[in-house]
Image (spheres, grey):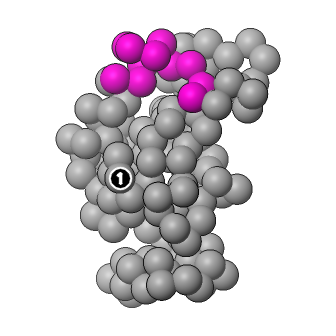
């Protein structure tokens, strides 16, 4: 519960505190939609924390605190089926990226309850 309180307080502008407690939340530093490591993309302003891989906006696509499994799965379905699992920011997409690699990333980095 302390970690959730810390995340809520983080949006008041204490980025260092936010980064320290980030690892203790369901989110960790990985996107719950695609499993991309978002450590460099996360900010104290949720409106600017956009996953370069799937385009999910932390704090909008799904909340930082107590994210909904249904919201995460719905957006993942959209990303995999409408965007074919391709990176939202194509300049960051690894060479040879495929939908199969996207599925592997999800399996490796997304907590089981959100898969």
Q: For the point 54% across and 55% down, which residue is it?
A: 49
Location of residue 42 (image quadrant)? bottom right
**Number of numbered callouts drawn:** 1
If the image is split into quadrants, where does the N terminus sit?
bottom left
Q: For the point 55% across and 43% down, which residue is it?
A: 51
Seen in the picture, residue 17 relative to 112 is either above or below; the reply is: below
Residue 33 visible at all: yes
Give SS at disc 1.
loop
Viewer-proximal residue, 72 or 109? 72
How many other residues sit within 10 Å of disc 1, few (<14), some (14-19) or many (≥20)? Answer: few
Q: Is residue 38 left or right of residue 26?
A: right
Viewer-proximal residue, 109 or 58? 58
Q: Position of residue 24 (x, y in %)?
A: 49, 71
Seen in the picture, residue 86 relative to 50 is either above or below; the reply is: above
Residue 81: in magenta span? yes
Residue 95: in magenta span? no
Location of residue 73 (image quadrant)? top left
Q: Which residues are magenta?
A: 78-88
Q: Position of residue 99 (x, y in %)?
A: 54, 14
Q: For the point 48% across and 13% down, which residue is it?
A: 84
Q: Is residue 59 left or right of residue 98?
A: left
Q: Is residue 32 left or right of residue 114?
A: right
Seen in the picture, residue 40 relative to 73 is either above or below; the reply is: below
Q: Position of residue 62 (x, y in %)?
A: 33, 51
Seen in the picture, residue 46 relative to 99 is either above or below; the reply is: below
If the image is split into quadrants, where does the C terminus sit?
top left
Q: Is residue 99 left or right of residue 64?
A: right
Residue 20 visible at all: no
The residue that label 1 is drawn on is 60
């Amino acid at each position: 519960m302390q970690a959730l309180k810390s995340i809520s307080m983080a949006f008041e502008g204490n980025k260092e505190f936010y980064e320290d407690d980030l690892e203790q939340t369901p989110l960790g530093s990985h996107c719950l939609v695609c499993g991309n490591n978002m450590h460099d993309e996360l900010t104290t302003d949720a409106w600017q924390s956009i996953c370069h891989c799937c385009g999910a906006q932390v704090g909008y696509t799904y909340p930082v605190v107590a994210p909904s499994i249904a919201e995460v799965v719905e957006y993942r379905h959209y990303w995999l089926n409408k965007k074919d699992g391709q990176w939202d920011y194509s300049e960051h997409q690894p060479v040879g990226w495929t939908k199969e690699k996207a599925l592997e990333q999800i399996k490796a980095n997304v907590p089981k309850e959100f898969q």
